[in-house]
Image: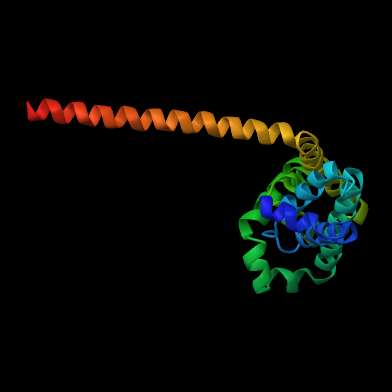
Amino acid sequence: MEGMIEWLAGLPPVAIYLVIAILAAVENIFPPFPADTAIALGAFLSHRGITDARLVFLVTLVANVGGAMGIYHFAAHHSAALFNSKFAKRFLPDEGIAFVRKEYQRFGLTGLFIGRMLPGFRAVVAPFAGLIHLGPWRAFFPMFCASAIWYGGIIFAAATIGEHWDRVAMWLRDLNVVVGAIALMAIAGGVYWWWRRRQRVAS
């Protein structure tokens, strides 16, 4: 993690925002991309004055929702080709589509919101909305709200940790010392128990 932080911190601010935007958009197409991690690290760096957490949020939200709407429009116009492709079979699994369809049938737009909040199902919501030819504004609203809440929470948490990183690092060091001491005592107790058992057997 430290290595990734230092790599990201070594980039010019514009490049950091560009990396965040690309990953936030690509996550709609290729879910395994580590968008959440990069976004959190971008917000974390705000405590060093390298980034601005508010700008990280704005860039993330625009790129993520913009990418989702692009997939929505593509699915609306090319749904048959999209869902019959090898790419869709691998990254838009049938169980994901079935889950979003079920939630949509149960809760309507709230179901799309729920699906957009869940990792693993998030990427299915936009193409599903296009597949059923849901109106663009009706598709946009739940995706926008879910992305704002999800990424807003990640960015707020990462920025807050960044502001108190010295305390967190000190706490982690103290925790490691305590855990190490407990481990040593456990090992010593185990060795003593083994030695006493050998003594009893020998006698």
User: In this image, 138 relative to 121: left or right?
Assistant: right
Image x and y of residue 144, in percent: 87, 47
Q: Looking at the image, which residue is at 68% across and 73% down?
A: 85
Residue 53 in view of the camera: yes
Q: Looking at the image, which residue is at 70% across and 60% down?
A: 33
Image x and y of residue 52, in percent: 90, 46
Which residue is nearer to you in this view: 67 or 126? Answer: 67
Give the color scheme: rainbow, by chain, secondary structure or one colour: rainbow
Which residue is nearer to you in this view: 123 or 95? Answer: 123
User: In this image, 193 relative to 110: left or right?
Assistant: left
Image x and y of residue 104, in percent: 75, 47
Quadrant position of residue 161: top right
User: In this image, 184 relative to 122: left or right?
Assistant: left
Quadrant position of residue 168: top right
User: In this image, 84 relative to 187: left or right?
Assistant: right
Quadrant position of residue 14: bottom right
Q: Is 120 situated above or below 146?
A: below
Q: How many marks?
A: 0
Could you tell me which quadrant the C terminus lies in? top left
Image x and y of residue 41, in percent: 76, 49
Residue 148 in view of the camera: no
Q: Is 170 situated above or below 108?
A: above
Q: Looking at the image, which residue is at 74% across and 42% down?
A: 114
